[in-house]
Image (spheres, coloured by chain):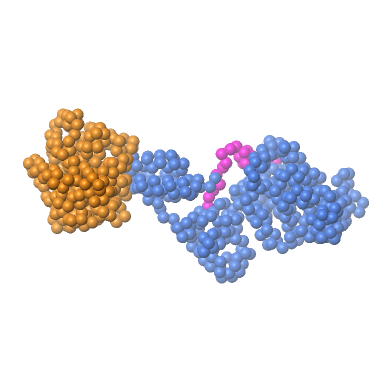
Chain colours: A blue, B orange
Amino acid sequence: MKEFYKIVELKGHIIESLILPKIFDEILDRGGDYVSEEIRIGKTKKDMSYARIRVTAPEENLLNNILDRLHELGATSKEDEEVILKTARKNGVFPDGFYSTTNLDTYIYYRKRWIKVEDISMDCCIRVDTGRMKAQSLKICDVKRGDKFVIGTRGVRVLLPKLPYKKGVFEFMSSGVSSEKPKGVMIKRIAEEIIELKKGKASKILFVCGPAIIHTGSREYLVSLIERGYVSTLFAGNALAVHDIEVSLYGTSLGVSLEEGVAAPGGHNHHLRAINTIRSAGGIRNAVKKGILRSGVMYSCIKSGCAFLLAGSIRDDGPLPEVITDTLAAQRLMKKKLKGVDLVIMISTMLHSIAVGNLLPARARTICVDINPAVVTKLADRGTHQATGLIMDVKTFLRELCDNLP
Amino acid sequence: MTELLLCPPTYYTVDYEINPWMHIHNKPDRELAESQWTAFYRLLTELKVTVHRIDPKPGLPDMVFTANGGLVFGNKFIVSNFRHAERAKEAPVFASWFKNRGYEVVHLPRDRYFEGEGDALMFGDTLVAGFKFRSDIHSHRYIGEVIGRRVISLELASPNFYHLDTCFCPLNDETAIYYPEAFDSYGREVLKHIIPNLIEVGRKDAMNFCCNAVVSGKNVIMNNCSAELRRRMETLGLNVFQLSFSEFIKAGGSSKCLSLYLKSPHNEP
């Protein structure tokens, strides 16, 4: 829940006049809340008392409404401090003393207005469009000479996420990473969360997937989730797509037959042949269109209208034509696609999980599934504290998730 | 030992409407107003109250309500900051009258409304102050600092009783009369807590401006009130003098509004 607040001060015979209790009542009656930061009570009859109160409200209008009433009752607002802006002198370089963002909802106070920072993600700077009164978090590579950036922490407000009222998977799994947790219950809760989200029309569920899903023979479950509409967007690398297509065309993943579990004769070059086939067809989409690719994760994405983004890496073979090899371009596109995402499920991919984690606002619910506990720990260590970990085999996770969803 | 400041009703009329009592089509009868004011003035002198007069000014019809000009405390005169522009010009006239007589004139910040004794009445060593319709509560803190006394701030709840002195009147160190419906529950609680003998006034007496009374020692001068209220006050040993202030009620004031305490038992440091 977002929260707006203001510090107000009161001085006078506010205890004897019952003005202070009246102010507390008014705040609560109007749907706000407060914390008494300081109360000093006058000693003698003529001594005045003093109170400093932090008034909070879920909406800015409501806060203003409460503040108007408190002002009528003698409270004065402590003036907010404006942000300091500095102009970037070079492309790709933040001005000295820049404010470095977190992934939490952030507001800046500029020209007597609180402005929400758009597209918040960690390790960015806040660019302010002074004409349009807009603020946006920006990666260092996107800095343009002449842009204005927030300097220091003055006038910057970071809101801590409030725990949801309802008991969901995130409270249930709030303790640290451990392989010794009742996975069945956790997966059931994730399924409930997904069902809940699907009730909302514009809900956005992102899957970030590694190639282990293919190697372990779990792709049928991912395909099923895509076909049933539980995946809004898929982020992956070249490898997932290549091996998925390899299975579709040759029945092997990394040359290993998924039917028999042994290396197929000549299987070591299947993935390269798969890449060649798709490149020859002019890309995955074209291969589907031409009937060359007729099953699998990528096929289902295209057929079901699930958006996908394949970001390349230095060890890629090929890559497939749809893979974005410019990492900065991929990063920008990922950030764009992350807008409004509600739930992120990261499965068996350390590098992609951390990359996506870095771009995510902390309010996006995040689940990380990996057989290796270090992945979840790393993700949290790099700032994605909201991530909840499930240390388990990917196939079991996907199968149980499928079973728990209608 | 009571000293009051009065202003003759030479230019008194109702030319504008700034409270629910005023209607420009219901103007006061000039002669009747003059005779009511004179009767009041005479009674005060008969009761050995020292009465000072401030010269009325044309174009300032409400100057007759001297209580709203400011608040006297010892040698200090805290001049009012009127909420309505119609009355704002009275402030410099009162300020200069007090300045010429050796008072230290205290001005509040311009954005803090305060309408003098209309919203501020001493009860023992406490200043009871009203806010909302005319004065604002922010002015109370400044006044508390100037006079060095406890200021109890009460929010007024009914536009008919737009000044504190229309619904509350201290009679002595123990007793006050008040009209409960002119306050909210917090205000009523506070009054019950600080005033040992708090007498409730009914709606009829309240609408007759009976709380808007002048007190000098044991003498209380008010507009005609009910026999019951009179009896209750007399059992406290008070002498109740009833006069008609009908023409002044047309502008929302009675005997108290027509007088400002220059000296009283409680406005000395």
The quarter of the rendered structure image containing the N terminus of chain A is top right
Residue at the spot 12% in from the left edge and 34% down from the top edge: B239
For this orientation, the residue located farthest to the right is A265
Nearest the camera: B249 or B200?
Answer: B249
**Quadrant housing residue B181:** top left
> Would you say B68 lies left or right of A200 here?
left
User: Is A167 colored magenta in this rendering?
Assistant: yes
The quarter of the rendered structure image containing the C terminus of chain A is top right
Magenta highlight: main SS: loop
Residue at the spot 47% in from the left edge and 56% down from the top edge: A113
Q: How many marks?
A: 0
The answer to whether residue B209 shows anywhere in this view is: yes
Nearest the camera: A48 or A190?
Answer: A190
The answer to whether residue B261 shows anywhere in this view is: no
**Looking at the picture, how far across and down is residue A292, in whole percent?**
86, 54
Residue at the spot 73% in from the left edge and 60% down from the top edge: A324
**Looking at the picture, how far across and down is residue B48, in whole percent?**
8, 42
User: Is A259 colored magenta in this rendering?
Assistant: no
Magenta residue span:
A158-179
**Looking at the picture, how far across and down is residue A284, in whole percent?**
80, 56
